[in-house]
Image (cartoon, grey):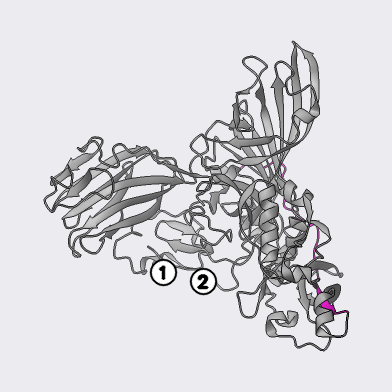
Amino acid sequence: MSSVVKRNAPLTNADFETGDLTGWNATGDAKATSQASDSAGIKPHSGSYQLRLGNGGSASQSFAVAPGTALTIKAYSNSVQSSQAVKVTIQFGDQPIIVLGNYSSGGNAWGQLNYTTLAPSGATRATVTFAANPGDIRLDEIVISETNAPIEDTAFVYLDGRPLPIRLDTEGDLPSALAPFTLTWGVKAPWDDIEPCILSMTLIDPNGTYGKRQANMQGRALEIYNSLQDPMPMFSGTITSAQLTNLNDGGRTKIDITASDKTWNIKTDTAKGPTADDRVYKGYQWAGGEFFNWVGERFRSDGIAAYSSVAGGVYGSDPLGTERISVYDVMKNKRSDHSTTPPTIRFGQVTYVTSFESQQANATWLTYISLPWNRGITLTGHLITMPDDFFNTSFDGDMMKSTIIEQASNIQIDKDATVTPPDDFYSQAEIKYYSRSVTNPGVSTTEQDKGSTVMTFSQDQSRMLRIDTGSREGENVLGIDMDEYVNAEGSAVSDDMNIAKFDVSEIITAVHENNTRLRLPELTFYSKRVRNIWRYVPIPIRLIILGSKFERFFPDTHGPWITLSGVVTFDPTNPRGTWAHKVSLFPSPMPSTYGQPTIANLKAINDPSDQLSNCDYPLGTFRYVTDTSNPS
């Protein structure tokens, strides 16, 4: 799935299909060739033409960039011989040239080069250069994409797929959406039940078509995009309520609407469990793949064509096939990951749901987001990044690059804002799970087979974890419901089902961090100062704040944070920026083991392409780095 924040930079003649080098600044032995005119008879990767670079040949092109944008440069390259390579460099304005790398496809074969770099603060233009090092090189299909592209001062509203104009007044063709509008999202703590993202907006109905009855609005699909180039919306949901106001406003009707994202659907839409499977017919509940089949059916009934599964799989207290339950009822407490040995309780998983549009399937995507309680932070060339599995989904690996660090000077806070202690602290965490018994009526095997075999689950098991509370006194227990079970009394319990042996380190780490970290005040990003679009998407993001006055005076605020809730506002009249996002932060711990690299450590990294010599990392960044093993 491609990220909502990826757009392509406007390169001219990037596929060379003009048959010449229009748009490119060529030097030395550089030309556009077809298979017929190519000296080695090489066929272009696609289309009719390609770029040929001989010894000393190069081609460059300049394009606009935005500060903080992560640029991913991809191109198909054919090295006629394995000893030949193309050297890729980039220069931002008049700053030093950055060598991204030397790529060889291995000899008379097409391969795809892929490099990522970060546009520094103040950069407005960049020049990318491809040079034979040495020749004979062919290039085709050059694409430069902006990951975490700058947010635009626009919004596009779609009602049932129909574009609506956005207006600040009541003039013009209608229906129209009035600005400002807001997106309210998130939860107080990551172990709370998920809540829908709520869109609040006013529509103007010119002739009463939609406003005659409230039912004319409820259930309609509503989407918000920042740019027509974005493959996925910032919000995608369903109108859940509508109220008429100002009925005599010049013959126009105002309708105040509320819309909820797909979280609302999976929490409120209930259905009975599967009944067609043979094992279900015999009385078992949700046997094997029937669980996933049922989940898929429920998602599709809500217009969700693709979804990310959940830790725990089918382990747990499966409800009876006669019960009416929602997808969320089934999945919210499935926290165990049995792909590890021993299984791990992924505390912080399955805590927030959002909806996107899958670019490939052109349909809504629903995914469970994993909060990164204990993930490393890696130095990769010019970027400080987190693991690509940050979201526990098939997101593009480039999506999180350049989003993790923000300068405190770019963030607004209330004038009298102060740090505060946590609202709740916990001295213990109780993991509550089930015991399972089986009832088989009948005497003979035949009678049992024809009878009703029912698995009975009772949440009467628990495991207590002690949490360090520092100097705080008192007892407070955090209850953690798990859809996990142990077998009936007398049955053998394998390590895979022995809760006492499960890895609970994520729980202890997360709750300890909750207890010990002071809370920063609410922060606001304004699009005039912070242009990165990912700051305005209503989902949790891990964030490192550099240069905070609070961190200087209150050491207990040190560390990464997660934006766990917020209000996104679109208001073209706001002088600080059309888009604003006020967020509440929750502490995310550093990994349990990490180094404190120095400049000398970084310089000592094996850096054959001289990638690090021109790096300009913000002051304070290095103390967060946990891994310097991959500078490429």
* Quadrant of res 382: bottom left
Magenta-highlighted residues: 412-441
Q: Mark 1 vs mark 2: which is more N-terminal? A: 2
Q: In the rendered structure, which amino acid carries the disc numbered 2? A: Gly
Q: Is residue 94 visible?
A: yes
Q: Nearer the viewer, residue 465 or 82?
A: 82
Q: Name the magenta segment's main secondary structure.
A: loop
Residue 541 pos. (x, y %): 60, 53
Q: Is residue 438 magenta?
A: yes
Q: Nearer the viewer, residue 379 or 451?
A: 451
Q: Residue furthest front?
A: 446
Name the residue that disc number 1 marks. 601
Q: In the rendered structure, which amino acid carries the disc numbered 1? A: Asn
Residue 479 pos. (x, y %): 82, 67
Residue drawn 58% across and 58% down? 391
Residue drawn 77% across and 49% down? 269
Binning the other alpha carbons within 10 Å of mark 2 as few (below 14), some (14 to 19) or many (20 upward) gives few
Q: CA distance from mark 1 to mark 2?
A: 10 Å
Q: Are marks 1 and 2 in contact (CB under 8 Å)?
A: yes
The kind of secondary structure element at disc 2 is loop
Residue 399 pos. (x, y %): 50, 52
Name the residue that disc number 2 marks. 595
Q: Is residue 97 visible?
A: no
